[in-house]
Amino acid sequence: MTKSILGYSKKALEEILSSLNQPKFRAKQIHQWIYSKFSADFSAMKNIPKKLIESLEENYSVNPFSLEHCLKASDGTEKFVLRCQDGKLIETVYIPSEKRRTVCISTQVGCPVNCVFCASGKAGLIRNLSAAEIAGQILFIANRYGKMPTNIVVMGMGEPLLNPHTIEGLKIVTSEEFFNLGARHVTVSTSGIVPGIKKLADEQIQWNLAVSIHAPSDELRRNIIPDKCRYPLTEIIDACKYYLQKTGRKITFEYTLVKGENDSYDNAVNLAKLAKTINAKINLIPLNSIEENSSTPTKSDLNKFVSTLQKNGALVTIRNSRGDEIAAACGQLKNQIENQQKSSVETAQKEN
Ligand code: SF4
């Protein structure tokens, strides 16, 4: 296995190069190839001598993935299953629109939180992604499309605030030395991990924070987010206040609307009240059901919920479900690919 040099400072690269008897200026060239021209392999770096490329390739790589599978929806949304160097699969989604090129990235293989409606949490946490693997998803997309995405949402597989490498990975995306994307174009979505929210706040970087509230009371939230990783709402609100105080960024409540579970009139009234305590926006996400749990709300359920929220003074947006036909809910496509691969291995074993 090689080590990705994504996120290596010029100084760190100079040290590697000097151990290979190479001049320091090569570090600047390599940085330009990666962070300005989005080269994902040393072999694409045209002004780097072939011999040096071969030496670097012995121990290092640029992008730590290979493409396993991709599917494109009619609305242009493209979902990628990427294979990490240890064989684990993750998902990255590219969501183009008229004004934006958004990428949804993963931070873990699997997820320890296991929200009831999510395919990613079904097998628990397999492992955290490294900082290079987090930032590598941006390089993968920038390399494929020839330009940087305009917006990053950290809403793919995994709970970002339970991965100690998330902050470092995001710094590769937003720091001037690397991809230099404006911090305000990055949104970190958490299921409400209180220590993680505080740690993110302490960075005092203008990343946006989205908290998956999913229910306006602890009692109801218990049915959606299992005990192990769930924090009480009062603690989450306090952590959000701390985030506001440290960064000044408006917080979003993500609310996955599940028919018959959290879509009552009272739920809407109480959600609006909760949002008001920190002046949060509410982003409603009609459930994109996975096979075992099909409780997608109808348009009329959704409209009723929105109207009650608005009558109670909440600022509401509805997230468009993009790329439904390509299994766009987090973890679905990766699970499908794994299941297909598993069944072809089983068939091959039976045939032998
Ligand atoms: S919704 Fe997010 S936090 Fe919940 S299980 Fe899925 S990936 Fe994890």
Image (spheres, grey):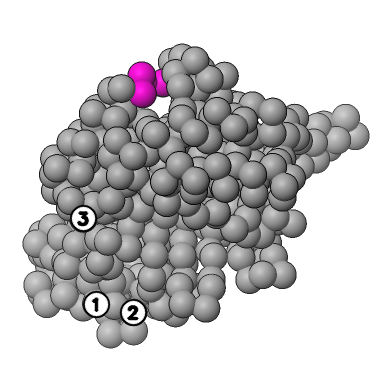
Three-letter code, disc 3: Gln
Find residue 166 and report its image quarter.
top left
In front here: 79 or 114? Answer: 114
The quadrant the C terminus occupies is top right
**Closer to the camera in the image, 174 or 28:** 174
Residue 326 locus on image (x, y percent): 70, 56
Q: Which residues are magenta?
A: 229-233
Ligand 1 lies under 8 Å from the Cβ of mark 1: no
- Report the amino acid beneath label 1: Gln
Q: Are marks 1 and 2 in contact (CB under 8 Å)?
A: yes
Question: On residue 186, which mark appears?
Answer: none
> According to the image, label 2 marks what residue?
37
Q: Secondary structure at mark 2?
A: loop
The dominant secondary structure in magenta is loop
- List x then y, in percent, for residue 202: 13, 40
Where disc 3 sits, the SS reads loop
The residue labelled by disc 1 is 32
- Residue located 59% across and 53% down the image: 81
Amino acid bearing label 2: Lys
In primary-sequence order, the first of circles 1 and 2 is 1
Left or right: where does residue 339 sit relative to residue 316?
right
